[in-house]
Amino acid sequence: MVMEKPVISTSKGAEGIDYTNNKNIIIEDNITNFAQVITDLLKDEQRRNQVGKEAKKLIKSTYNWQIYKTTLNNIYNEVLNED
């Protein structure tokens, strides 16, 4: 997603991501429809590009490593300094 590529996933595969379906990821839980969703996306360059751009925005604004760096550093320090 951070590479600005559209992602098609199941809802299970996207657990933990605070996504908006059909905006920054495409969710398809019906295996029968999954291949058709991929085919449709491959045929629609504008939609591919839009979903990819929104995916990158989501990841960079919400899941950026820098956001978690301080929190993780504090946790590691607490664990290492426990007696």
Image: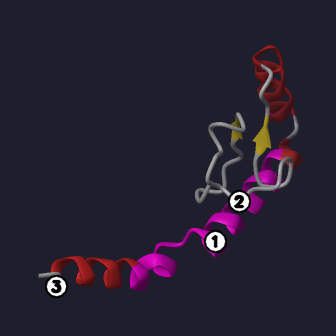
The residue type indicated by label 1 comes to Thr
Quarter that holds the C terminus: bottom left
Mark 2 vs mark 1, CA separation in Å: 8 Å
N-terminal-most mark, 2 or 3: 2
Q: Residue at x 46, y 73 (%)?
A: 65
Q: Which residue is mark 3?
A: 81
- Which structural element holds mark 2? loop
Q: Which residues are magenta?
A: 48-71
Quarter-wise, where is residue 1 in the image?
Answer: bottom right
- Which structural element holds mark 3? loop
Mark 1 vs mark 3, CA separation in Å: 29 Å
Image side of residue 67 versus residue 12, left or right: left
Image side of residue 59 versus residue 40, left or right: left
- Label 1: how many residues lie within 10 Å, few (<14), some (14-19) or many (20+)? few
- Label 2: how many residues lie within 10 Å, few (<14), some (14-19) or many (20+)? few
Q: Residue at x 80, y 13 (%)?
A: 32
Residue 47 lies in the magenta-colored region: no
Q: Residue at x 81, y 24 (%)?
A: 39
Quarter-wise, where is residue 17 in the image?
Answer: bottom right
Q: Which residue is mark 1?
A: 62
Quarter-wise, where is residue 70 in the image?
Answer: bottom left
Tell which of 29 and 22 is nearer to you.
Answer: 29
Tell which of 44 and 9 is nearer to you.
Answer: 9
Q: Which residue is mark 2?
A: 18
N-terminal-most mark, 2 or 1: 2
The residue type indicated by label 3 comes to Asn
N-terminal-most mark, 1 or 3: 1
Tell which of 68 and 1 is nearer to you.
Answer: 68
Q: Which mark is residue 14?
A: none
Give x and y (percent) for residue 12.
65, 36
